[in-house]
């Protein structure tokens, strides 16, 4: 237990330097020190590791007028590539990034939601990974790692999909299956963790260290970062806000519990609410979820009273549930994301900002802002690539040069 | 924003060494290094600061058989004293501790709950602080700091009671008032933060790094620690689980919202539930809260059917609300504490362990344990003294010797 401390501190320092590169693009050791708050000595030790691993390169020498010129450093985009993979029930979407996490291309492969064997999903992932590499003319041998987001509960350390309800997967050793199949380094995690990391490094996290992500789609979930660090909980399940109570003994949820937030603000919940408002509404004949939400959006544009009422009730449910999240976590900022938000956010977000007022402590609301995500698509792939790069860099550190923050061994 | 990093890392290292002293009592630098995972060099730098501040002393020299003898170090109990103050609506309880946080005496002073001016409360605190110092024969001049827990929402950095609902306090600059009145260094915080810190350092936190505290009494609240660190949120309000939803649009809560957990499992909630079960039950004629809970306990001992039903319903409410906490935070351990738990825990906890099963994710429950607190009384005072000692030690560090984890300036 206590041995984790030094490794944590060391890893935090390394990630702080990496994050500084993402923000600054190019920087001297002195600028990295200023940006991270780490000493120049600590920064120099970490940069030395990054240089010897080929992750960082010297872009130029800069003269400051006094003293000798300083080395201007950057992440080496040619060092290798990362592939981020977003696996959902109906598709696999892959995006390839260079080492500075610039996207180079995206490919999407449909999955039949009625087929659920691990091998079927692995086949889909292989097709999508090789497809995106071909698109961007990248050799498989130059891929540093593949980060795969899987629905449900995932244990990244063990590489296991603990439970994927819609596929009925239990304890599938998906990382081993993918590593064997792809012949590449694979890292797995849950999409909410990936989205939170993407927001943390490239989105709202640049402004806010205490951050909650709320994702609305078929499923509903959250992720949060405290003090700039992703919160995982003890078994990577923190943030399952979608399965907290909204209505005691209310609607049956997909998770088996009654009254969960997801059963009201997930797309299935929206359908159930509309059926309560106007059981014969034509939109209820649409069985697919995205076309249904499109119909809600059209109804709002055309002023359909039932749809206006649906958004009003949904905003009431969402505000109450966000009130719980705010009271529990006391974040500085809530980012709403997901495809329901993309379609209905313009109506939903102003209502939620208003209706959350009685639902959370005044002194927590006083410091809170709420907005839609400003990140473009492929957020899951971006987050998974970031996590995979972190994992790669954690292995780069040389335990023998650990003098700056401790001598703990580095996780491999 | 980014400047916080080095300070955080440095502060974490210092607190890790302090915590090691609490656990080990006496230790060599090598043992401190082993226990914390920090390098011997880092430990030596921090110990040097502690020695020059007089916080640590050399207890003895120990020979290891090889090499020169090593210095056996300990916190210097004679360096000064800490007073922990638990202010509630009806009493002020103070405990004085030496610097190794051994309790030396406790004094309690009643408060009239109908009097609520800041000066009345300050008078009560002064009486209790001077009372406990007289009891333990300690001079006011040797008090390092006084840690005062106040009900409601508190901002420790500003020293302000943001909102204390039962006193109708808004933005009371209580730290300044107390500092002027006592002539001592004062640190203020919220009782849940104090209890969480006490559990973290002296209770369940010795075994569990991801920990939630759930306190049941008149009010209901939680605190949590992730990765061994107290979670505060952006305005020190994280953990307001007592004011998350149990029943959408349910019972009116003291906070003004409808359906909060507190309105069901706080003592007022227990009274309301009993009134639903048996409106004419004699225990409902008891208007004071502790005697009411004593009556519930007696009823359980004697097999009163209404009280058995009351505990069963309360366990159902509590299990559902704890399910939400578990799904959000994914802790390794939940500690139940507070005076309702002291009286009813033997009945409540086994029922909660059973009823939580459908209320939270199986893979989060698989790693979860739930128990009553093993700490004896004065937990709030112990936690406040610990926070005050941390605050004192944060000011001890010398920025110029900051080479080990960074060169950030140290918070005063
Ligand atoms: Zn659910
Ligand atoms: Zn409330």
Image: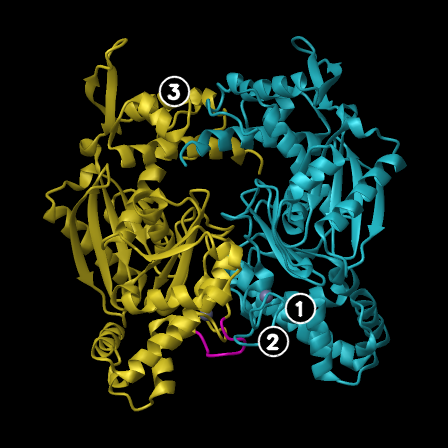
Chain colours: A cyan, B yellow
Image spot of residue B101 (x, y percent): 24, 41
Q: Which residues are magenta?
A: B246-254
> Closer to the camera, B261 or A138?
A138
Mark 2 surroundings: few (<14), some (14-19) or many (≥20) residues within 10 A: some
Image marks 2 and 3: residues in contact by CB distance under 8 Å: no
Disc 1: which residue: A265
- Which picture quadrant has residue A381? top right
Q: Does B196 appear in magenta?
A: no
Prevalent SS, magenta region: loop
> Closer to the camera, A367 or B364?
B364
Image spot of residue B266 (x, y percent): 36, 71
> Closer to the camera, A79 or B368?
B368
Q: Nearer the viewer, mark 2 or mark 1?
A: 2
The Cα–Cα distance between marks 1 and 3, rounded to whole angstroms, is 53 Å
Q: Quadrant of the N terminus of chain A?
A: top left
Q: Residue at image x 56%, y 71%?
A: A246
Q: Secondary structure at mark 2?
A: loop
Left or right: where does residue B249 sit relative to residue B56? right
Q: Quadrant of ligand 1?
A: bottom right
Where B309 falls versus A192 (above or below)? below
Image spot of residue B399 (x, y percent): 43, 25
Q: Does B253 appear in magenta?
A: yes
Answer yes or no: are tags 2 and 3 on the same subunit.
Answer: no
Q: Which mark is residue B40?
A: 3
Q: Residue at image x 28%, y 36%?
A: B22
Q: Secondary structure at mark 3?
A: helix
Where A183 falls versus A324 (above or below)? above
> Closer to the camera, B23 or A22?
B23
Q: Nearer the viewer, mark 2 or mark 3?
A: 2
Chain-order first, disc 2 or disc 1: 2
């Amino acid at each position: 237990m206590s041995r984790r401390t030094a490794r944590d501190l060391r890893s935090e320092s390394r990630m702080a330097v990496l994050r500084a590169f993402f923000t600054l693009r190019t920087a001297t050791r002195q600028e990295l020190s200023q940006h991270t708050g780490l000493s120049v000595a600590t920064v120099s030790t970490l940069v030395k590791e990054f240089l010897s691993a080929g992750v960082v390169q010297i872009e130029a020498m800069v003269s400051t007028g006094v003293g000798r010129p300083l080395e201007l450093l950057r992440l080496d985009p040619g060092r290798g590539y990362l592939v981020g993979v977003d696996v959902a029930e109906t598709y696999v979407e892959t995006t390839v990034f260079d080492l500075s996490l610039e996207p180079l291309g995206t490919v999407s492969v449909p999955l039949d939601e009625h087929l659920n064997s691990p091998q079927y999903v692995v086949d889909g992932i292989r097709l999508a990974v090789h497809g995106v590499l071909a698109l961007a003319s990248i050799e498989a041998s130059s891929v540093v790692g593949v980060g795969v987001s899987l629905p449900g509960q995932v244990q990244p350390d063990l590489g296991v999909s603990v439970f994927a309800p819609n596929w009925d997967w239990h304890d599938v050793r998906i990382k081993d299956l993918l590593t064997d199949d792809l012949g590449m380094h694979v890292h797995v995690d849950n999409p909410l963790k990936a989205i939170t990391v993407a927001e943390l490094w490239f989105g709202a996290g640049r402004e806010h260290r205490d951050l909650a992500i709320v994702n609305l789609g078929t499923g509903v979930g959250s992720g949060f970062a405290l003090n700039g660090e992703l919160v995982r909980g003890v078994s990577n399940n923190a943030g399952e806000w979608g399965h907290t109570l909204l209505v005691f003994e209310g609607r049956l949820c997909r998770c088996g519990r009654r009254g969960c937030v997801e059963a009201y603000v997930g797309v299935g919940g929206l359908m159930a609410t509309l059926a309560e408002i106007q059981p014969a509404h034509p939109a209820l004949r649409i069985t697919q979820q995205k076309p249904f939400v499109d119909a809600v959006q059209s109804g709002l544009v055309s002023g359909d009273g039932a749809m206006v009422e649906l958004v009003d009730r949904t905003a009431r449910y969402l505000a109450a549930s966000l009130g719980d999240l705010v009271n529990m976590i006391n974040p500085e900022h809530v980012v709403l994301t997901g495809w329901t938000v993309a379609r209905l956010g313009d109506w939903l977000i102003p209502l939620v900002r208003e209706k959350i007022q009685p639902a959370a402590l005044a002194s927590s609301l006083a410091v809170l802002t709420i907005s839609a995500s400003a990140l473009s698509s492929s957020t899951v792939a971006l987050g998974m690539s970031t996590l995979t790069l972190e994992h790669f860099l954690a292995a780069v550190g040389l335990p023998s040069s650990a003098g700056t923050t401790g001598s703990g061994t580095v996780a491999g």
